[in-house]
Each structure stands twice: as C-alpha cells, then as structure tokens.
Image (cartoon, rainbow, N blue to C red):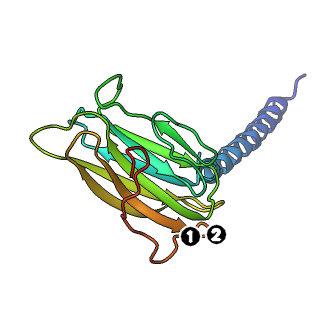
Amino acid sequence: MEDPFDDLEEDGTDTVFRDVIMLALIGFVAMVIMLLPHISREKQETKDSNAPGNVIVEMHWPSEMENDVDLWVKAPGEGAVGFWNQGGEVFNLLRDDLGAIGDATDENYEVSYSRGIPSGEYVVNVHMYGAPPKDRPIPVKVVVSVKKPLEETRQILETTVELRRYNQEETAFRFRLSSEGDLVEDSVNTLRYPLITGR
C-alpha cells in the first residue's frame, strides 16, 4: 500500500529547489544591473583617452554659405598643413570641406589633429579659397583644444575671423605651448604669419 505522504514530500522538495534556483537567478540579474553603469563608464573613459590627437584645431563657417574656406596649421619646426599638404610629422588635416561640393552634410567644418604636443609656437590660419559672397563677409569660427595624456580634452582658444575677399589669408592665432602642453602665458597673438599666400 502506497504512503499518501510520499507525493507531498517530493512536491515540497521540488518547491524548495525551484525557490533556491529562482533566488540565485534573481541575485545574478540584480548584480548585472548594478554593474552596468560602471561598465559603460569604463568604456567611455577608454574611448576618450584614445582620442585621435593632442592639439585639435577646428574651423566652422555657416552651413548656408556654400563657399570653400581652408584651414591651415603649423606646428613648431614643421611646414604648413592644409588641403594640398594634408599630413606632416605633427599635424594631419582630417577633413577638407569644399563648401557645398561633394558634401554629405550641411555642416561646413574642417579639423586638424596633432600627434603629440611639441613645445613651441603654433600658427592657425584661415584662407578664402573660392570667391566670397558679394553681400556679406564669411564669419569663420576657430577653436583650439588640447588633450594631454590621461586627461580630458580642454578648449584653450576661440575666435571668429571674417573673410571678405578672394585668396584672403588671416592668422586666427599664434600661440606657444610648453613641454607639458600648457598654453604659455601672454603668448597668444594674431600677428600676421602667412602660410600659403606669401609674406
């Protein structure tokens, strides 16, 4: 004759086993959820520390203006880097924007990055390659940032230069950086230093 309590004992054991498994699963899921923000933050910090350059020079002009403006940069001891010399030992021009020609976006933007931060004088020029509009000047915003190893990118300079005529080249900045990558006090000026149109 079968004992009617055998089934109850088996069901009780199954229930306890399922409860233990379910609690372990819930605990694992809770740990993963708590760790997710930390994993994402580590990825973001790694991405920023692997930024493509140390001295970043950006140039923007209004998206509705279909004109070709060029960014030219010069690092200490290096020749000028721009649209027809896009790479040097220190700087590389990553984007040569022709205005409306062959552009997938409306943004008018050029950028140069350096490898390392050599100490000495840097020159940043803007050049009106094509003909400017007849009714108004082109306002060109120039931004210089520095990214030291293991630090966040930090903007150090910003200005706006107006271009009014064909082949106009203006010096947006001349500045010096120390061997530690710091902006040398009182070194910033806009004294003319042509890089492509002659002195």
Q: Secondary structure under badge 2?
A: loop
Q: Is residue 102 above or below residue 161?
A: above
Instruction: Left or right? Give the position of 93 relative to 138.
Output: right
* Quarter placement of the N terminus: top right
Q: Amino acid at mark 1?
A: Asp
Q: Is residue 155 above or below residue 26?
A: below
Instruction: Left or right? Give the position of 54 relative to 31.
Output: left
Q: Amino acid at mark 2?
A: Glu
Residue 44 in the image, given as x and y percentages of width and height: 58, 49
Residue at the disc numbered 2:
180
Q: Is residue 69 above or below residue 122?
A: above
Residue 6 visible in image: yes
Q: Residue at x 65, y 59 (%)?
A: 149
Q: Is residue 25 above or below residue 124?
A: above
Tag 2 near tag 1, CB within 8 Å: yes
- How crowded pointer 1 is (Cα within 10 Å; few <14, some 14-19, many 20+) is rated as some
- How crowded pointer 2 is (Cα within 10 Å; few <14, some 14-19, many 20+) is rated as few
Instruction: Left or right? Give the position of 156 relative to 108.
Output: right
Residue 33 in the image, given as x and y percentages of width and height: 61, 48
Residue at the disc numbered 1:
182
